Amino acid sequence: MFLVRIPPPPLSDFVAMLWLNEGYAGPHGKERILPKGTAQLVVNLAEDSIRVYDREDTGRVERSRGAAIAGPHSEYFVIDTAEQMSCMGIVFHPGGTFPFFGMPASELWNANVALDALWGSRAIELRDRLLEAPTPEGRFDVLEEALLAEAARDLERHPAVRFALGEFLAVPQARTIAEVTGQLGLSPRRFIQVFSEQVGLTPKLFCRVRRFHEVLRLIHQGRQIDWTEFALSCGYFDQGHFIRDFRAFSGLSPSAFLAHPREHLYHLPILD
C-alpha cells in the first residue's frame, strides 16, 4: 500500500506531499538514493531506527532513532530497504524546510539528521502519535499538525528565492544564474546567501542537480538514448561535461547506470 496526500495551504507552498508506505519488501538489502536537491522527512513505523550507510563502505552504518530528515543532497546516499516495510514521510518542495527546523537549510546540505536532534522530545512524541493513529488519514493529520506546530510565524520565502526557484524550475537549462540575478535587485553575493539559507544549495549547485533530475526523468520515460542529444537538450556544454556531472551525482557513468536494474527514478538497488 502506497498512499499520498497533498496538504492544503499554507503547507502546500512548502510540502510537495505526505506519503505512507506499508508492506514493501525489496529483494535487495540496500538502495542508493540519488540527489534531487530537495529534502525529505522519514519516520520508520516498523522499528525505532533509521540507518544510513557509508557510501564507500556499506558495511559501516550510522544509526539514529526512527525519525530523521534527509536534507537537500547533491550526492547519493545509501539506505536500508528493510526500513521501508512500514514508514511515512514528507517530501518538501525545493526551499521548503527552512520554516520548520529552526536552522538555515544550508546546514542540512548532504546531511541525514535525526529528527530528535532538531525537535527534541517532540520528535519521539510524533512517532508515538503516528503509531497510535487508527487510520492512514489519521496519520496524515498527525503529520500536518506537527508541521504547523513547528512552523515559523511567517510562512513566506524571501521574494528573491521565490522568484529564482520559479525561473530555475520552469526551465532549468535555459536561464543562466546571471540572468536571474540581474532581475532581483540583490548583489550576486547576497543572492547566493539567501538562496543557500532557504534552499540548502547554492544557485549553481541547485541548477546542476535539477539538470541531472531532468536527465533521469528522460531516461525513466524509456526514451531511446543518444547521450550527445541528451547532453545538449539538458543544457550541458558537451558530452564530457554531461558524463562528469552524471558520475558526480550518481557515482556511476551513464552507461553503467543504464545497465543497472532499477524500478524507481531516484532509488537504485545495490546488488550484493
Image (tube, rainbow, N blue to C red):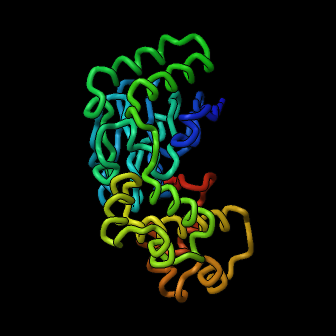
Of the pair 222 and 56, the residue shown nearer to us = 222
Counting from the top left corner in percent of width and height, residue 97 is at: 42, 43
Residue 265: name its quadrant.
Answer: bottom right
Q: Residue furthest front?
A: 185
Q: Is residue 43 found left or right of 10 in the rendered image?
A: left
The structure residue drawn at horizontal position 50% and vertical position 30%, both measured from the top left corner, is 87
Is 49 rendered above or below residue 231? above
Residue 172: name its quadrant.
Answer: bottom right
Q: Is residue 269 found left or right of 229 in the rendered image?
A: left
Counting from the top left corner in percent of width and height, residue 24 is at: 58, 34
Of the pair 213 and 251, the residue shown nearer to us = 213
The structure residue drawn at horizontal position 45% and vertical position 29%, both measured from the top left corner, is 147
Q: Quadrant of the N terminus?
A: top right
Counting from the top left corner in percent of width and height, residue 158 is at: 42, 52
Of the pair 79 and 201, the residue shown nearer to us = 201
Q: Is residue 76 found left or right of 259 in the rendered image?
A: left
Q: How many marks?
A: 0
Is 124 rendered above or below residue 95? above
| Residue 258 is at least partly visible in this image | no
| Residue 18 is at least partly visible in this image | yes
Is 144 rendered above or below residue 256? above
The structure residue drawn at horizontal position 57% and vertical position 24%, both measured from the top left corner, is 140
Counting from the top left corner in percent of width and height, residue 136 is at: 61, 20
Is 43 rendered above or below residue 261? above
The structure residue drawn at horizontal position 52% and vertical position 27%, both measured from the top left corner, is 86
Of the pair 109 and 25, the residue shown nearer to us = 109
